Image: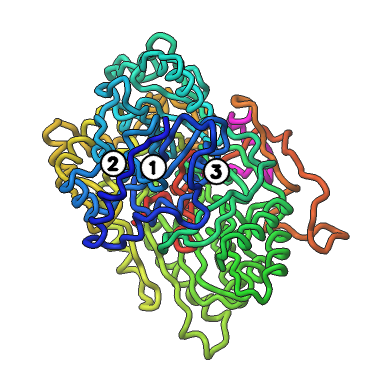
Amino acid sequence: MIPATDLWPRIEPLLAAVERPARYLDHEWGAVRSPEPGDDFSFCMMYPDTYELGQANQAVRILVNAVNAAEHLWAERAFLPAPDMIDAMRAAGVPLASLESCAPVHEFDALGITLPHELAATNVLEALDLTGLPLRAADRAEADPFVLAGGPCAFNPEPYAPFFDAIMVGEGEEMLPEVLAALREGRAAGRPRADILRYLAAIPGVYVPGLYAWRATDEAQAAGSWAAPGSGAPAMVAKRVFEGFAESDAWEPCIVPFTEVVHDRLNVEVLRGCARGCRFCQAGMMYRPVRERSADNVVAAVLRGLDETGYDEVSLTSLSSTDHSQIASILSRLNRECAGKGIRVSVPSQRLDAFGVQMAQLVAGQKKGGLTFAPEAGTQRLRDVINKNVTEDDLFSAIDAAFAAGWRRCKLYFMVGLPTETDDDIKGIASLAQRAYDRARAAVPADQRGNVKVGVSVAVFVPKAQTPFQWDGQIAPEEVQRRVDLLRRSVKYRAVDVSYHDPKSSFVEAVMSRGGREVAALVEQAWQRGARFDAWTEMFDEQAWRGAAESLGLDLAAIAQTTYEPGYVLPWAHISAGVSQRFLARERARAAEGVTTPDCTFDDCSACGVCPDLGVANVLAAARKAGGEEPAPGDADGHADDGLDDLDDLDSVRSERDAGANLWDDWDDDLDEPADDEGGPR
């Protein structure tokens, strides 16, 4: 059913009294205006934060395009209004509306909400309440829309489970249209809601929480899973992989907003997955295998996108774009095509060991902004523990190349609270940052040294599901603050600025990341106590969460901070990212020994299990070479005649952000926010 109600006459009068009213205007350049003949099933894709954040999300664009390309399906977008607009809408009795047609969200056949990061949980309930729908799936009526979820947090779905009819695990280009087609068929046949949900549970990658009972602790440990499947529900839900990514067109029709948004530029996804294997990084595990688009595909998409949108900046997005086997060719060709046009080509989150002199000359052409590098830890011992596989010499070489090539600003990203971290590792951050600053100054002419700036940004380690460190607890907020204070005292250079994430909100992230189904009640009570927009520093309400936990009798410290042995069954044991628990346990053991594991796209298979278990493989456009790609002999542009399918190495990987831009993933690809940093937006 295509919604018929138009709420614009009721919304327009509210705009004069709220900030940034352009957030709520439709008909942006490139927006799809109306359904095609024959479209009879409607879907609203929602991002649980404001337009500025959600419209920049690549996955929203990808999935809306995928649904609108499918027969009989029609998709629109929705975003959570800002707090002032929410309050105005509630006071006026106006429900949440879609953007394209300004139709009530509750009139759509299905609603999809991305779960981009842990601090968006209360915003999900704020959005559902604003639609007028019951918060819990069990309370929804037969005619209510089906409420779906997906995204990075789907890899531990339990804190969200009671609020959704179905949760999709993995990449959504094929899965989402398949799920919506099944819903359409069930509705058209007049099947009961419960029967339709049982049918959805048979679709690979789809988790229907209502079909699973939650076991007690002892029973869960004995059974090997906390979720007891009911009739017809699979015991294990494995993620979906979009195997056709490498061959798919890198150009995605996109919308040019009326107002400035985060990452306000053309974004083109050049590859999906990252096989570096950082042991803290959820994205690096859950988006395996690695799949590269060819240089011809990427360059054509960029040129078409610039022509159709008018943007003057393009970002080549992925978790690790400088690992692309043809990145030098891509940048050379784009710089040549864009020469003299005032267009900036940027590569987010550069790898230290792939950023040499050639890369420094290619990235961003003549327009130099700021660079980010993510050493993550201050000592080589701890970098080996987390499997970062970079050295301080890699950092200094990258700094030398970048500042000699014209950059004057650089930000370094680190984490505090990583497993086995000591005070010496914290002091090592200060030492490394100061020596990086010295190298940067030495690399520029004497009269420009006053312009050199080096920043240090520190995130708090949050244990993530489906990673080798999933069994490790987070350090207490008080200990985080002590270590941050030690770092700030240890930095002696006034020119090195240190910023850090809030330990209190990072603590809530850890609770959400590690909790089971009991945490859903915590989210609901925290929201009832006023928690919303928790990722906004000025909006985070610690007392709402503490008070909710106290009323429920939940020990939040135990959830966030307890360390388990690898044999302990965790609340997400029934969800599979394809990476085997045996591999994760082995990687944790190697971390304790300080032993690193190589990237399987450069080296041998690491036996993570993804490729044989899911029937997939790494797909590379050409052979990868350590330190970046050089043009192929006899081909000045570095063109590869044929793509290379890495079928011999049966492994792969994929943050950030959350981050590939996939199932409703929140890409953290700004030059000032690298994907390796697992914290949510601040």
Residue tagged 2: 127
Mark 3: give few (<14), some (14-19) or many (20+) Cα within 10 Å. many
Between discs 2 and 1, the one toward the N terminus: 1
Image position of 451 (left or right of 459): right
Asked whether residue 600 is drawn in magenta, I would say yes
Of the pair 298 and 350, the residue shown nearer to us = 298
Residue 297 seen from this side: yes
Image position of 366 (left or right of 571): right
Residue 518 against residue 308 in the figure, above or below: above
Between discs 3 and 1, the one toward the N terminus: 1
> Which residue: 62% across, 72% down?
401
Amino acid type at circle 1 is Met
> Which residue: 48% across, 79% down?
452
| Mark 3 vs mark 2: in front | 2
Residue tagged 3: 277
**Range drawn in magenta:** 590-611
* Dominant SS in magenta: loop
Q: Position of residue 602 (x, y in %)?
A: 68, 46
| Mark 3 vs mark 1: in front | 1
Residues at badges 2 and 1 in contact (C-beta under 8 Å)? yes
Residue 464 seen from this side: no
Amino acid type at circle 3 is Gly
Residue tagged 1: 46
Mark 1: give few (<14), some (14-19) or many (20+) Cα within 10 Å. many
- Say which element carries label 1: strand
- Say which element carries label 3: loop
Asked whether residue 120 is drawn in magenta, I would say no
**Residue 564 position by quadrant:** top left
